[in-house]
Amino acid sequence: MTLLAPLHGHHSTPLQRAATDGVAGAAAALALFRLPPGWTGWLLAPIAADWAGGSPANAARSTRRWRASRPRLRRGFHALHVAEIPVVWWLSPRPLVFQLLSLTLAAKLTVFELGTRSET
């Protein structure tokens, strides 16, 4: 098991991994290069990568099966991501940044819920 196995799923295809990594990398790059210079971009980049990369990862059947087999994971998954919302709000230099990241998180959680329910 690799460090990214929970993000990618245990039996994801190379195309699924490339989609997840590509979207996550693009979100991190946008956070770093489009935000004003300073430490906030460096703190927002990993969160943006996680939230954006999670949508294609959660859409993968391998990830859905892995998470559906661990029902207690659902509460922790939601708690972790909801706890990050005030941090993102505090770090966001403009309301638009917070709104875009919030929409990204909403997409990730929706795909997670729909996918997990379809596998159970």
Image (spheres, rainbow, N blue to C red):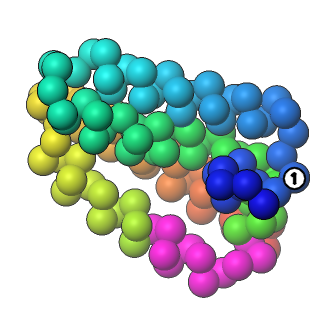
**Does residue 18 lie above or below 64 as drawn?**
above
Q: Quick one: which residue is furthest to the bottom in this view?
A: 72
Rendering quarter of residue 14: top right
Q: With 8 as the anchor, is 31 left or right in this view?
A: left
**Residue in the image at 43% along x and 48% along y:** 106
| Crowd around label 1: few <14 · some 14–19 · many ≥20 (10 Å) | some
Quick check: can you spot residue 103?
no
- The picture places residue 53, in percent across and down from the top left corner, at 56, 39
Amino acid, disc 1: His
Q: What x and y, as percent, mark residue 2?
A: 73, 55
The image shows residue 110 at horizontal and vertical percentages of: 54, 53
Q: Per the image, is 71 magenta?
A: yes
The reply to whether residue 22 is in sight is: yes
Residue visible at 12% across and 31% down in the picture: 93
In the figure, is residue 29 to the left or right of 54? left
Tell me if residue 76 is in the magenta stretch. Answer: yes
Relative image position of residue 17 (x, y in whole percent): 75, 36
Q: On the image, numbered disc 1 is attached to which residue?
A: 11
Residue placed most toward the observer, 90 or 104: 90
Residue drawn 46% across and 44% down? 51
- The magenta region covers 68-78
Please give left or right for residue 58 compared with residue 27 in the image: right
Which quadrant of the figure contains the C terminus? bottom right
Pick whichever, 89 or 49, lies toward us. Answer: 49
Position of 16 relative to 11 (above/below): above
Does residue 69 lie above or below 22 as drawn?
Answer: below
Residue plotted at (70% across, 68% down):
67
The quadrant in which residue 47 appears is top left
Image quadrant holding the N terminus, namely bottom right
Number of numbered discs: 1
- In this rendering, would 25 be left or right of 43? right
Which of 21 and 86 lies nearest the eye of the viewer? 21
